[in-house]
Image (tube, helix red, strand yellow):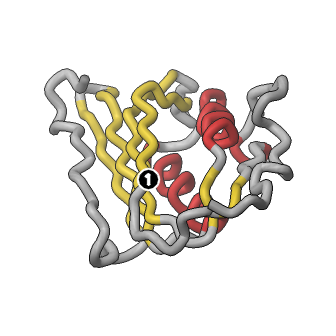
């Protein structure tokens, strides 16, 4: 491993932070990938993701699974947690939330590949699952199933 301090520019980790009140105000942070020469996948699971219905302001709940194959950058997990938490008071449909998260991470990290599965709990008796992927999965990387079953009381 390189002796360079790849964590020196992080501002949120290890300090007091406030949950942003809107996803656009959330500051994602990244660190240089010290294993950029190795083909591997990273998974973040957020089983308690919440946002608001833009029409009724009622809470919506989802189980998110974010998979990505990094290139030069890794997302710092506390900044990701704060970004996802910023949706708590944000009104948007399931599709918009899921795709917005995937696109923002793709633009910010410039990974070799990224996908997000948004497994939304029922509203009005209908669960909605939303999937975003940047393209075909790269060869030579183990990409496991996201492991979230079709709706039957999720969890």
Residue sitting at 52 percent across and 47 percent down?
Answer: 97
Q: Is residue 121 above or below residue 116?
A: above
The image quadrant where one finds the N terminus is: bottom right
Q: Is residue 121 above or below residue 147?
A: above
Label 1 packing within 10 angstroms: few (<14), some (14-19), many (20+): few
Asked whether, in this view, residue 112 is left or right of residue 31, the answer is left
User: Looking at the image, can residue 12 be seen?
Assistant: yes
Asked where in the image residue 118 lies, by quadrant, the reply is top left
Residue sitting at 35 percent across and 35 percent down?
Answer: 120
- Between 77 and 61, the residue placed more toward the observer is 77
Q: Is residue 56 above or below residue 69?
A: above
User: Looking at the image, can residue 90 be seen?
Assistant: no
- Between 38 and 25, the residue placed more toward the observer is 38
Asked where in the image residue 51 lies, by quadrant, the reply is top right
Residue 101 in percent (x, y) is at 55, 52
Residue 82 in percent (x, y) is at 68, 35
Residue sitting at 41 percent across and 54 percent down?
Answer: 67
Asked where in the image residue 122 lies, by quadrant, the reply is top left
The image quadrant where one finds the C terminus is: top left
Q: Is residue 138 above or below residue 16?
A: below
Secondary structure of residue under mark 1: strand
Residue sitting at 44 percent across and 70 percent down?
Answer: 38
**Count of numbered tags:** 1
Asked whether, in this view, residue 32 is left or right of residue 44, the answer is right
Mark 1, residue position? 42
Asked whether, in this view, residue 97 is left or right of residue 30, the answer is left
């Amino acid at each position: 491993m390189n002796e360079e301090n790849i964590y020196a520019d992080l501002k949120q980790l290890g300090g007091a932070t406030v949950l942003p009140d809107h996803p656009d105000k959330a500051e994602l942070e990244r660190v240089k990938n010290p294993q950029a020469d190795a083909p591997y996948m990273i998974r973040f699971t957020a089983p308690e993701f919440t946002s608001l219905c833009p029409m009724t302001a009622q809470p919506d709940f989802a189980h998110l699974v974010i998979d990505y194959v990094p290139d030069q950058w890794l997302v710092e997990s506390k900044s990701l947690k704060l970004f996802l938490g910023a949706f708590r008071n944000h009104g948007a449909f399931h599709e918009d939330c899921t795709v917005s998260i995937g696109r923002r991470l793709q633009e910010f990290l410039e990974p070799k590949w990224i996908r997000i599965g948004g497994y939304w709990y029922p509203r009005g008796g209908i669960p909605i699952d939303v999937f975003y992927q940047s393209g075909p999965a790269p060869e030579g990387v183990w990409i496991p199933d996201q492991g979230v079953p079709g709706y039957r009381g999720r969890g």
